[in-house]
Amino acid sequence: MSAKFGFLAVTAVVGLTAIPALQAQSIPDPDQTSQGDVSVTIYQNGQSLVQDIRQLNIQSGRSRIEFPDVSAQIRPQTLSFAAANTGIIEQNFDFDLLTPGALMEKAIGQTVTLVRTNPATGQETRERAKILSTAGGVVIQIGNRIEVLRDDGLPVRAVFDRVPPNLRARPTLSVTLESSRSGTRPASIRYLTPGLGWTADYVALYNEQDGSIDMQGWVTLTNTTGTTFHNANTMLVAGNPNGGGRNNNRNMVRAGTQSSGREQVGDFYLYPIDARTTIANRQTKQVSFMDVQGVQADKVYRRTVGWLSNDRNPVNVSSEIAFSSSREGGLGDALPAGTVRFYQRDSQGTPQFIGENTIGHTPMGSELSLRTGDAFDVLIQAEVEKREVLTASEWTKTARYIVYKDGEETRRIEEERPDRYWQTTMRYTITNAKSEAVDVDLVQAGLDRGWWSRDYRIVSEDGPGEQLNADRRKWVVPVPANGKREFRVTYATRY
């Protein structure tokens, strides 16, 4: 019950069992359930599919059957019912749950018993009171006087004669059936509901000496449906049905092409939980789905430099851990989207947290490089060392002119002319304060300058580079221990 009912929030329901003569509906044991064989399929777009098969004694002809313990957030329009020799005529979902607040609100106009206890003597006094209002507090009538119940610290509880018939202890679905025969038979209901969700989390222990990681994958289940699903056969679906969010693969270096062998439905991978599990309401549960040891992994130092970057100060490079999800030498599985947290042992052998990053849905065979933070000891300062406009005879453009005289066209001129271009020399100064040499992935971005600069060339470079795409070129630059390296690249960019 909400706080507006003060001290009654604790004691109102207790009164339901304090008087043996109450004509209340039975209140089920919270550890018991009316559910049958439950299967839950949880998607990553906020929806879940619940399938529940119960053994029901269905009478011949028209009858009304109740299904308690369904999700309090059920989407009734998605309900499917099936039983042999039976059809459904009407369905109703009762979601007005039995709470102290709802009980008091439903009792407006009714008479209850107020039990007050003298804190000094322990003696109880009882008065019959009529509930007049619950707006902003509880207003009651006792005889000819009107009172407002206050939270003054005195022990008071309300005892109700009965539970209103339209209040339910648990969310309940009721259906009206037409059956051609009597008898007990399996009846199944299937419906969609929000309130169940799952995320994937990965714990990776990085061994820098061996160049490997040990990775565990955990599924975190959450249940806010208002209902506990008991001993459920649970299936997780990795994917975003019906546009349930865009996949984020910014950390994927290369997409994989291997089939993982996992079962799929449509274009989505299935991750079944090995054993049946109870998903309690308002509970977070973690279940392991991956445990792989000794996967090859490399530390990568990287910086991507923007076009014509001219740093006033050195910039720390990013520290990344690169690994594969391939069958050979990798994790050997398709990875659902989630967060990867990296740990590394210190000199005492204690794992210490070194960073985290996210991955999108990742096919098996993919290569990933996850940034864990900034490298303390490795920095790059990018500077424009020289920039000038030159003319290149090998770069020509077609010039077209129309000559007019007295407002009329007299002739057309078309000729090839040498084009102009910018020649830019970039100097990248890389420093390394570590006691061992490192290789730094230096990436220059912004080479594709758009319609006004449709071409560029590498005039010279201090080491061989790899063209990643039209916009980016990468160099792997070795830097000595406790030293620095100047690396230069000259570009010719069409003007």
Image (cartoon, rainbow, N blue to C red):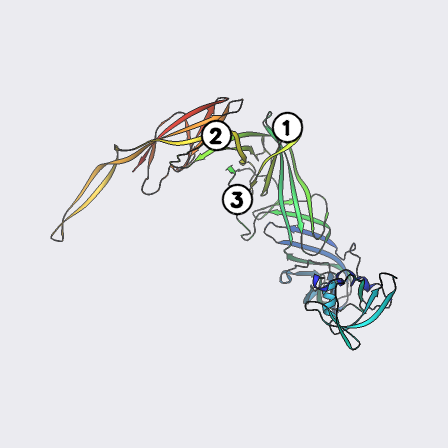
Q: Residue furthest front?
A: 120
Which of pointers 3 and 1 indicates the residue nearer the eye? 1
The residue that disc 3 covers is 248
Q: Point out the image quarter for the C terminus.
A: top left
Q: Residue furthest bottom?
A: 144
Disc 2/disc 3 C-alpha distance (Å): 28 Å
Q: Position of residue 359 (x, y in %)?
A: 56, 41
Q: Is residue 234 left or right of residue 329?
A: right
Mark 3 and mark 1 lie on one chain; the one further toward the N terminus is 3
Q: Position of residue 216 (x, y in %)?
A: 65, 36
Kind of residue indicated by mark 1? Asp
Kind of residue indicated by mark 2? Leu
Residue drawn at point x = 61 percent, y = 54 percent = 47
Q: Measured along the vertical axis of the image, is residue 470 above or below residue 194?
A: above
Helix, strand or loop for disc 3 = loop
Q: Measured along the vertical axis of the image, is residue 371 above or below residue 240?
A: above
Helix, strand or loop for disc 2 = strand
Q: Is residue 465 left or right of residue 269?
A: left
The residue that disc 2 covers is 379
Instruction: Tell me whether the residue at label 3 lies in contact with that at label 1, contact meaning CB atoms closer than 8 angstroms.
Output: no
The residue that disc 1 covers is 346
Mark 2 and mark 3 lie on one chain; the one further toward the N terminus is 3
